[in-house]
Amino acid sequence: MAAPGGTGPIGPFPPGVDTEAERDEYDKRRRRVLWTLPSGLYLVGSRAGDERNAMTLNWATQLAFDPKLVGVGVEKAALTHRLVSEGRVFSLCTVARDDRAIVRRFTKPVEVDLVAMTLNGFGFHDGISGAPILDQAPAFLDCAVRQEVDAGDHTFFVGEVIDAGFQVDESTPVLRMEDTRMNYGG
Ligand SMILES: Cc1cc2nc3c(=O)[nH]c(=O)nc-3n(C[C@H](O)[C@H](O)[C@H](O)COP(=O)(O)O)c2cc1C
């Protein structure tokens, strides 16, 4: 996925990378290296008031043992960004490896049906934070935002885990980026 609004190489450039051609080559190399960073693939549930959303995300990681902090990098233009920023909560749901098709269903704002309790037709329930959790997620972390770190075109939301659970057999293999042909980053 291209950098938003990116028309050319973004600096700073290391020594010896001076010409436009060198910068272009460096930019492409840096992107290929970034693509090799291993990552998981998740659905992030968000909620502000009555508004709910869920989106595919791979920029997620644990940050501390004590307290239990996890961080997610969310694009500023995304609906999820507004909901997490306003609602101060999010859920991080894993995806079963044999359920990989679902990630393509959560790359734009979802259709919420509060009667059927579905997001894009997929059953959900609200976690104790109020953020939606997909019923078919193998496991979830329910988080309360403790910090919001500005990260250029994204915001890194740091959340404290306030609930966690398995919804299927704990040994169910979970999806990683490398199981797909997709990438996000670079
Ligand atoms: C494989 C994959 C990984 C993604 N990872 C992220 C991510 O880590 N952070 C992010 O902001 N958007 C990520 N996206 C993009 C979002 O899923 C989504 O397209 C966009 O942010 C809009 O979401 P919205 O429904 O909240 O508006 C990823 C998309 C794909 C297909």
Image (spheres, rainbow, N blue to C red):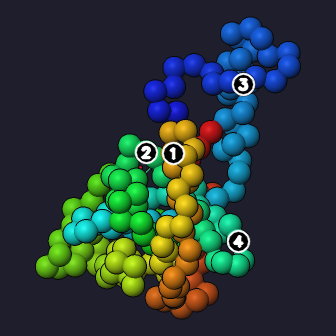
Mark 2 residue crowding within 10 angstroms, few (<14) / some (14–19) / many (20+): some
Q: Which residue is mark 4?
A: 64
Circle 2 — which element? Answer: loop
Left-right relation of 69 to 112: right
Q: Is residue 179 visible?
A: no
Q: Which mark is residue 154?
A: 1
Q: Which mark is residue 12?
A: 3
Residue at 70%, 79% in the rendered image: 66
Q: Which residue is mark 2?
A: 76
The first of marks 3 and 4 along the sequence is 3
The quadrant of the image that shows the C terminus is top right
Amino acid under disc 1:
His
Residue at 36%, 74% in the rendered image: 131
Q: Are marks 1 and 3 in contact (CB under 8 Å)?
A: no
Spatial CA distance of label 1 from label 4 is: 21 Å
- On the image, which quarter does residue 68 sit in? bottom right
Amino acid under disc 3:
Pro
The first of marks 1 and 4 along the sequence is 4
Spatial CA distance of label 2 from label 3 is: 22 Å
